[in-house]
Image (cartoon, coloured by chain):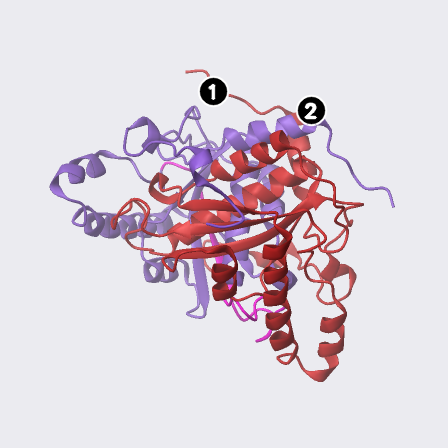
Chain colours: A purple, B red
Amino acid sequence: MQSIQISESERDAFYKVLHNRRDVRREFKPDPIPQDVLMRVLEAAHHAPSVGFMQPWDFILVEDLAVREKIKVGFEVAHAEAAQMFDAERRETYRGLKLEGILESPLGICITCDRQRTGPTVIGRTANPEMDLYSAVCAVQNLWLAARAENLGVGWVSIIHHDTVRQALGIPDEIMPIAYLCIGYVSDFHEKPELEKAGWLPRADLQSLIHHDQW
Amino acid sequence: MQSIQISESERDAFYKVLHNRRDVRREFKPDPIPQDVLMRVLEAAHHAPSVGFMQPWDFILVEDLAVREKIKVGFEVAHAEAAQMFDAERRETYRGLKLEGILESPLGICITCDRQRTGPTVIGRTANPEMDLYSAVCAVQNLWLAARAENLGVGWVSIIHHDTVRQALGIPDEIMPIAYLCIGYVSDFHEKPELEKAGWLPRADLQSLIHHDQW
């Protein structure tokens, strides 16, 4: 059997994509995403690993401005609730952060998880029922990296309640929303994560996170 | 500001890595992983997106054979339980599948999530408390893809109970195990997922998973 090898230059190209991926909120341009580019990005998501080859994901492409406005209102509600959870000192910093690009980006993509897709018993999910949700998250990360390989920015809008997303997009009760993503071309990609640049938290030292054989 | 662009050939190299990633169980070789290679793969995981820049992950590198044998026993227990959940027809197929490479691969990597890492209030986790778990899953997927870029195979062992993993690796109660991965060089990578090849389930048609504006 002849197995496909990745060369050093291909490896380096892969790492260039991975290390230059950012969570984008502010820099979206309205330019539409060509259909062939979008399909490559969705194919990448669809080729994520999934428990028991369940492929539990769906992709809702959200272009309609009226629908995106509902998502935006849902963000604003959850964002106002969130601000109250920070102490006074951090609340002002929090309010000053730009945390979504729902209306600025030309497209939203909602990735969901159908937990019943292949019946009640799924290989690899028997001991850990959350594995199907994790598979859908792997699809999110594949999509995010593929978008960067296409010079597209992505931002994950997590400050919104699932029920709001369900209502705005007509998602059935039994389907679990995993991520609402904003995607589009960008004026630039930041060199570092914005929360690192803003001094909110530092990058952790990798060595401090590595354990040998025992925690 | 000059933003880093990904060229077409770099994009294609990225997709080559992504589309040739497999869940490996059977083809591991015992060859050790060089330290610089392992560190690049862990750096890739550490550069996953994380909610509120929380970086909730730790990495337990499991080389000790006695520890890996405990993991293997834990797999066998959960695997025997799982077999009983399939109907008679599928049970024999299930039993015939090779679903882990715990002892054959030279290294296990357990990725965990410290849900308290940066305090009780985390940007982006206020409406969706599961976001920190999802961040750790993004680290798993980054690691998996980076391993493929280094021609290393990875298999996710999900047929094991969290408590078994906690006990074998001395993980504190408040830390959530996310994934136990087997990693190593391989004799070959399959062209397609094994469960697809085995006829367990077909690859879904991507078009059937795409919705426009509404589910």
Residue A22 place in picture, x, y as percent: 44, 33
User: What subunit carries mark 2?
Assistant: A
Image quarter of the N terminus of chain B: top left
* Camera-nearest residue between B13 and A101: B13
Residue A58 screen position, x and y as percent: 54, 57
What kind of residue is marked 1? Ser
In the rendering, at what x and y percent does residue A10 appear? 69, 28
Residues in magenta?
A: A104-129
Q: Is residue A109 visible?
A: no
Q: Is residue A127 magenta?
A: yes
- Magenta-colored segment: predominant secondary structure: loop
Structural crowding at the residue carrying mark 1, measured as other residues with C-alpha within 10 Å and reported as few (<14), some (14–19) or many (≥20)? few
Which residue has dot 2 on it?
A9
Q: Amino acid at mark 2?
A: Ser
Q: From the viewer's perspective, is B99 left or right of B167?
A: right
Residue labelled with disc 1: B3
Residue at 51 percent of width and 30 percent of height: A19
